[in-house]
Image (tube, rainbow, N blue to C red):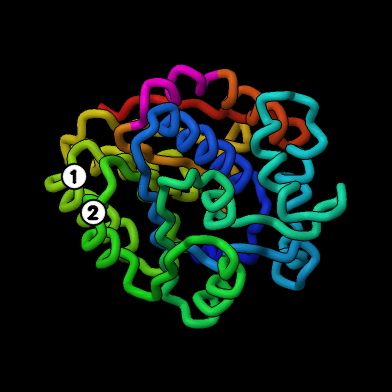
Amino acid sequence: MNYRHAFHAGNSADVVKHSLLIALVRALQQKQSALTLIDTHAGCGLYDLIGDQAQRTGEAAQGVLRALADPNPLLDDYRAAVQAVNKDAEPRLYPGSPQVLAQLLRPQDFLILNEKHPEDAAALRSVMRDTPAAVHQRDAYELWLALTPPRTPRGVVVVDPPYEKTDERERITTTLAAVHRKWAHGVTVIWYPLKDRATHERRKDQLRKLGIGKFLCVEHWLYDSEQPGIYNGAGLHIVNPPYAFTEALPPLLEALRTALAPEGHRGKLAADWLG
C-alpha cells in the first residue's frame, strides 16, 4: 500500500491518530520531567485540504470535517489543534503530526522530526521554521535506532511510514526489537493501515513474538464487514502507554467511532493488549 500523507490529509485515520497522540503526550506531561518527541516519517508538516492531492481523494470530508462538526467535548483538544493552523472556521489547512506535536511542547520538551523525501523535507523545514523543532533528512529506521534512548528522562517515538516498500513492516519489527532491547521503558507509537482482518492478525502474531510486555493495539475498522481491496481503516500499536492515557481511552475511542462511522455502518474502534 502506498500511503503518502498529502493524499490522505485529514481523513479518519488522521483524526484518530492525532486525537490519540494529543491524549498520549498530555498524559505523559502530567509529570514535569522533560520529554523528547521523535517523528521518524514526518512528511510535510502541513497540508492544503483544497489542494490537488487532497482533493483527488476527498477523504477530509469523512474525517476532519466530521470531527469539527461533532459536538462531543472529548474532541475539543483535537479540534483546537486543527483550528490553531487555520484563520477561518472552515479549515483549509491540516496539521500533520509535526505541527500537532509542536503545539504540545513545554519549555523543557524537545521535538525531533525526520523526513527522507527531499521535497517533503524541504517543505517540512519551511513549515517548522518558527518552532524549536530539529529537522533531519535521514533513513527513518537508522534515525529511530540512533536517537533512542533520548537524552531526556522520557521520550515518545512516532513511526508513521507511507508503506510504499514491501519490507516496511519487517523493518519496523526489526527496529522496534532492537530499540526495545536498549530502551525497554520507551513509548513508541506505530501507525498502520488496515485492509483485511486475516492479514492484520498475522501481523499481530509476529509482534507478539517480540515479547514486549506493555503493547496496546488500537484498531479502527470503518465498516461492519470487510470491503475487499480497499482501505478499511487504520490502527496504532502503542508500546508502554502511560496509565493515565489508557484509563481515559475508552470514552475517547467511542466519541471518535461515533463521529467517524460511515453512513449505514457502526464501525469498530477498540483497544486491546497484545499478548
- Secondary structure under tag 2 reads loop
Few, some or many residues within 10 Å of mark 1 (<14, 14–19, 20+):
some
The answer to which image quadrant residue 222 occupies is top right
The quarter of the picture where residue 166 lies is: bottom left
Magenta residues span: 241-250
* Prevailing SS of the magenta stretch: helix
Is residue 206 at least partly visible in the picture?
yes
Nearer-the-camera pick, 16 or 209: 16
Query: Residue 205's spot in the image, x, y percent?
Result: 26, 38
- In percent of the image, x 72 and y 49: which residue is there? 84
Q: Which residue is mark 1?
A: 183
Q: Position of residue 117 (x, y in %)?
A: 46, 77
Name the one closer to the observer, 237 or 74. 74
Amino acid carrying label 1: it is: Trp
User: Circle 2: is it few (<14), some (14-19), or many (20+) Cα within 10 Å?
Assistant: some
The disc placed on residue 148 is: 2
Relative horizontal placement of residue 241, taking residue 229 as reference (left or right): left
Q: Earlier in the sequence, mark 2 or mark 1?
A: 2
Q: Is residue 163 above or below residue 52?
A: above
As displayed, is residue 195 above or below residue 113? above
Residue 83 lies in the magenta stretch: no
Give x and y (percent) for residue 209: 17, 39
Quadrant of the drawing holding the C terminus: top left
Question: Which residue is located at x 74 percent, y 24 percent?
Answer: 72
Kind of residue sitting beneath label 2: Thr
Residue 127 point in image, percent of width and height? 61, 69
> In the orientation shown, which residue stands out farthest toward the left?
181
Q: Is residue 114 left or right of residue 13?
A: left
